[in-house]
């Protein structure tokens, strides 16, 4: 190799190395806004997006993991995107919805057989206490087919079609409540959450700490349902506005979350955490540039799996 060729090769290598260093520097700067160090969290996978959908913090965000009951975000999204959806349509509670909860030891809204609840109430029942019975009722109502099994399969297919529409390539639904081999990534759950939060009804439901409403009971009287949100960030973290928990033995504790302060909004997802609410608070503090704040949010015991 002559001197001229050697000089050109050294110049090319230097440029390539310099470009790599600059690219890595940009990524590090983007992951650590305001000069704050990245938070130490227990969750195995995390993604935090800002109001423009840009990544603010990520930890193994592209690895598919069991999503547990965060699947119900997609249940609500499919229902709310149904053309001409009537939120006041009454749905009769079937015994099989209650039997499903018992069979799978799932979280429940304690819907009573024969009662007639509205689609709107079923959204609250699915997203606040994480009722698998309510998610089943929605799948049975908005799926197509001659039998309950056909309708729920149809609805799960709609969930997967919606995922493809949103380009969630690593997200797969096997069930309507996330108790099976339903998988996603923190990055795609956060992306789905941003989409879901564009709907005003969804936003109103997931920021509600407690819902109380009446429904015609099977005995001809009126039954009052009260559902409490399993998302303990609400009321405990400044600016929290939703959105959904999820827990199974396979998935661990998952949380999709959002918060707004002033003109800043962050949406995030974390998967498989031993302390999901404290983790979420730390991650949000990182986004808001408030890393020194008190972030300990104790978790209350949940009833059943998949809450």
Image (cartoon, rainbow, N blue to C red):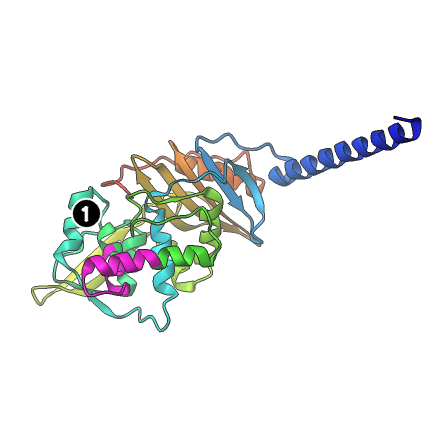
| Residue displayed at 20% across by 41% down | 105
Q: Quadrant of residue 185?
A: top left
- Asked whether 126 falls inside the magenta stretch, the response is no
Q: Secondary structure at mark 1?
A: helix
Sort mark 1 into few (<14), some (14-19) or many (20+) by Cα contacts within 10 Å. many
Q: Is residue 212 visible?
A: no
Q: Residue furthest right?
A: 3
* Residue that badge 1 annotates: 101
Whether residue 100 is situated above or below residue 94 in the rendered picture: above
* Residue 160 percent coordinates (x, y): 38, 55
Report the span colored magenta.
136-157
Left or right, 39 with respect to 70, comes to right
Q: Is residue 164 visible?
A: yes
Left or right, 180 with respect to 92, comes to right
Q: Residue furthest bottom?
A: 84
* Residue 252 percent coordinates (x, y): 34, 35
Q: Nearer the viewer, residue 266 or 59?
A: 59
Q: Nearer the viewer, residue 255 or 192?
A: 192
* Residue 303 percent coordinates (x, y): 23, 41
* Residue 227 percent coordinates (x, y): 26, 52
| Residue displayed at 56% across by 51% down | 53
| Residue displayed at 40% across by 58% down | 161
Q: Quadrant of residue 146?
A: bottom left
| Residue displayed at 77% across by 33% down | 18
Left or right, 114 with respect to 63, comes to left
The quarter in which the C terminus is drawn is top left
Most common SS among magenta residues: helix
């Amino acid at each position: 190799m002559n001197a001229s060729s050697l000089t050109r090769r050294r110049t090319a290598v230097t440029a390539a190395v310099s470009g790599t260093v600059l690219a890595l520097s940009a990524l590090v700067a983007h992951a650590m806004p305001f000069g704050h160090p990245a938070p130490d969290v227990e969750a195995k996978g995390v993604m935090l997006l800002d109001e423009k959908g840009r990544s603010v913090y990520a930890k193994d965000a592209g690895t598919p993991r069991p999503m547990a009951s965060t699947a119900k975000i997609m249940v609500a999204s499919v229902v709310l995107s149904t053309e001409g959806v009537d939120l006041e349509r009454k749905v009769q509670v079937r015994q099989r919805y209650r039997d499903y909860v018992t069979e799978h030891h799932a979280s429940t809204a304690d819907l009573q057989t024969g009662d007639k609840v509205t689609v709107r109430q079923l959204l609250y029942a699915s997203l606040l206490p994480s009722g698998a019975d309510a998610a089943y009722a929605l799948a049975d109502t908005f799926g197509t087919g001659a039998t309950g099994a056909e309708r729920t399969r149809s609805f799960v297919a709609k969930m997967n079609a919606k995922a493809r529409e949103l380009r969630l390539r690593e997200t797969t639904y096997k069930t309507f409540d996330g108790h099976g081999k339903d998988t996603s990534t923190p990055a795609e759950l956060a992306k789905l959450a941003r989409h879901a939060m564009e709907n005003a009804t969804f936003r109103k439901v997931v920021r509600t700490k407690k819902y109380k409403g009446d429904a015609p009971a099977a005995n001809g009287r009126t039954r009052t349902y009260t559902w409490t949100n399993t998302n303990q960030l609400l009321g405990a973290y400044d600016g929290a506005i939703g959105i959904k928990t999820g827990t199974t033995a396979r998935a661990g504790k998952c949380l999709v979350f959002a918060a707004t302060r002033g003109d800043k909004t962050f949406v995030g997802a974390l998967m498989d955490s031993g302390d999901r609410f404290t983790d979420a608070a730390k991650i949000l503090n990182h986004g808001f540039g408030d890393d020194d704040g008190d972030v300990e949010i104790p978790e209350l015991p949940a009833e059943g799996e998949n809450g």
